[in-house]
Amino acid sequence: MSPHTRAMIAAATFAVITGKKVAGIYDHAAGQRLKIAAECRGDQLQGFDGDRGAKFGGTLPEIYDAGDQSYVSITIDGASASGHDRASAGDYSARVADGVVQLYDYAEDAWFAYDVQDPDKARSFHR
C-alpha cells in the first residue's frame, strides 16, 4: 500500500471513529506533517489530500480516492477499523487512541503511526 494511501486511511479512520475533524496529520515513518483534512457526518466522509491535490470520500464503508481513482473500504468496530485498498489489493487494520492512529499494513507487515491535528488549535494535536 502506498504511503499516501495509508495516511489517507489514518485521517479517514480518525474522523469516522471520533466524529472529530482532521486538519492535518504527522506521519512518524516519513517524519513529516501532511496536509490531509477529513470530516465525517453520519456515514458520509469527505476529505482532501493537499499534498497530492486530491479529494477523497463517499458513503461508508467505501471511500473513493480521486487521486488514485480507486476505492478503499473502511469497516468500523469500536475504536478499531479494518479494510481493503483496491489499488494495491492490500489489507489493513487500524486503531485510534489519544489522538494517534496506528495502522497495520499487512502487505508491508509493519505498523505505521500518525498524530492527528486538531483544527481548533493551530499547531496542536488531538490529545
Image (cartoon, rainbow, N blue to C red):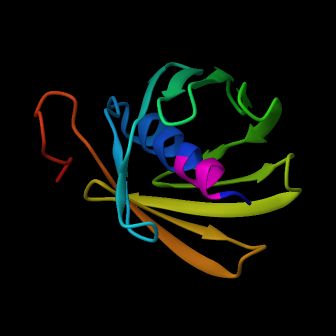
Residue 50 shown left or right of residue 68 in the figure: left
Residue 89 shown left or right of residue 28 in the figure: right
Q: Residue at x 45, y 54 (%)?
A: 79
Q: Quadrant of the N terminus?
A: bottom right
* Extreme residue toward the bottom, this view: 109
Q: Residue at x 65, y 49 (%)?
A: 5
Give coordinates of residue 72: x percent, y percent: 75, 41
Camera-side residue of 46 and 54: 54
- Residue 63 placement: quadrant: top right
Residue 11 shown left or right of residue 1 in the figure: left
Q: How many marks?
A: 0
Camera-side residue of 102 and 54: 54
Give coordinates of residue 26: x percent, y percent: 34, 55
Q: Residue at x 13, y 42 (%)?
A: 123
Camera-side residue of 126 and 4: 4
Camera-side residue of 29 and 71: 29
Give coordinates of residue 50: x percent, y percent: 47, 30
Q: Residue at x 80, y 35 (%)?
A: 71
Give coordinates of residue 7: x percent, y percent: 53, 50
Residue 69 shown left or right of residue 93 in the figure: right
Q: Is residue 126 magenta?
A: no
Most frequent secondary structure within the magenta stretch: helix
Boundaries of the magenta span: 3-7
